[in-house]
Image (spheres, rainbow, N blue to C red):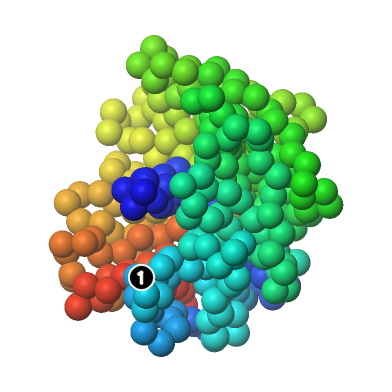
């Protein structure tokens, strides 16, 4: 079971994948607010990145911040007893969130109305929403062996996936009726829904049931109009859509004419742009600021916008367990994720550019 959970964490970090409480569009946790000007991605021209460690409850270890809105963040940590728990960071303080039956759980996303999306660490993972101290389980398909919601928008629409009879189905929920769901099917044979925008645009990927018979397709669309392949990448090569904000989508794919080792892709509308070589894209905001990593023998958090690349600092040079990982980027340019300390602890952090 522990290996399964590690696999889920890796999948959520790099694919999806699936956090924002409050109405303030400026970072008040782990750093000062960032003013916008004409710099790339809405960042101040010539700004310098700074890393900030987020607090953890006393005695807790191995925390990670997943998503946020700049004023609040959610993620997880390991308590003194070794159990994984959901955490909320707001106004400089950290709070443990309740879960169904007190089960181990991880928070994946949050909307501006304060609804935190999470999933339990049962043998059959199940999604739920934490709202002002109240735990609301989400309906799951009959016979599902694993169901996870990865993203929630301010309207309370949730997207995710469920494994039923060995096939992955794309699932959509609404907080207006959490005990109901809409099954978007399996598309080519397996459908993952990874993220959605505030206007209800959904992104994800599909693949044939046998992963060796065809490429993965990056998809975009809506519940009403359905999903279709994102253009601008080689359809014979794997592509994947991980996150979306405004007109932007990030993921992986092979842009024709780009170097063969370029896998990170930024879509603006229907136009696909290859990211720098060896850069993986994990998050994007509506200004086109991409957060991800450079993989060149060391895990380094990297941001990119309009042709400009920044390498973000680590808490330490602790290499055996990696250095840092980013998972989201706020509208004000704040990046959130985790970094490894000199003594090997993984702690939640933010990065700001000012």
Which of the 4 image quarters holds residue 118? Answer: bottom right
Taking the image as drawn, is residue 119 in sight?
yes
Q: Nearer the viewer, residue 339 or 252?
A: 339
The furthest residue to the top: 213
Q: Nearer the viewer, residue 73 or 58?
A: 58
Residue 119, compared with residue 234, is above or below; it is below
Location of residue 291 in the rendering, given as x and y in whole percent from the top left corner = 44, 56
Location of residue 252 in the rendering, given as x and y in whole percent from the top left corner = 42, 36
Location of residue 193 in the rendering, given as x and y in whole percent from the top left corner = 59, 37
Q: Residue at x 45, y 24 (%)?
A: 216
Residue 161, compared with residue 57, is above or below; it is above
Q: Residue at x 26, y 57 (%)?
A: 299
The furthest residue to the right: 176
Residue 114, compared with residue 164, is above or below; it is below
Numbered circles on residues, count: 1
Which of the 4 image quarters holds residue 311? Answer: bottom left
Q: Nearer the viewer, residue 338 or 31?
A: 338
């Amino acid at each position: 079971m522990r290996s399964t959970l590690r696999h889920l964490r890796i999948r959520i970090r790099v694919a999806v994948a699936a956090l924002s409480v409050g109405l303030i569009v400026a970072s008040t946790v782990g750093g000062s607010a960032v003013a916008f000007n004409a710099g790339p991605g809405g960042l101040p021209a010539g700004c310098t990145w700074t890393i900030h460690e987020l607090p953890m409850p006393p005695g807790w270890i191995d925390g990670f911040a997943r998503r946020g809105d700049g004023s609040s963040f959610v993620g997880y940590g390991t308590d003194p007893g070794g159990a994984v728990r959901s955490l909320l960071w707001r106004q400089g303080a950290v709070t443990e969130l309740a879960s169904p039956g007190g089960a181990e759980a991880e928070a994946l996303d949050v909307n501006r109305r304060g609804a935190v999306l999470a999933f339990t660490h049962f043998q059959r993972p199940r999604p739920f929403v934490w709202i002002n101290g109240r735990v609301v389980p989400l309906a799951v398909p009959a016979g599902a062996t694993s169901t996870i919601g990865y993203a929630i928008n301010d309207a309370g629409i949730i997207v995710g996936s469920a494994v039923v009879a060995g096939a992955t189905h794309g699932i959509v929920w609404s907080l207006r009726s959490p005990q109901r769901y809409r099954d978007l099917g399996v598309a080519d044979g397996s459908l993952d829904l990874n993220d959605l925008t505030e206007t209800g645009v959904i992104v994800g990927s599909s693949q044939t049931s046998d992963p060796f018979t065809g490429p993965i397709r990056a998809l975009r669309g809506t519940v009403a109009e359905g999903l279709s392949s994102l253009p601008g990448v080689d359809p014979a090569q794997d592509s994947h859509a991980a996150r979306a904000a405004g007109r932007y989508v990030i993921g992986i794919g092979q842009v024709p004419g780009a170097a063969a080792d370029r896998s990170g892709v930024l879509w603006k509308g229907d136009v696909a742009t290859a990211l720098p070589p060896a850069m993986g894209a994990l998050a994007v905001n509506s200004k086109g600021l991409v957060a991800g990593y450079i993989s060149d023998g060391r895990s380094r958090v990297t941001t990119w916008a309009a042709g400009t690349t920044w390498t973000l600092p680590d808490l330490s040079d602790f290499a055996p367990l990696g250095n840092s990982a980013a998972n989201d980027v706020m509208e004000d340019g704040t990046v959130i994720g985790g970094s490894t300390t000199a003594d090997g602890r993984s702690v939640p952090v933010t990065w700001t550019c000012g």
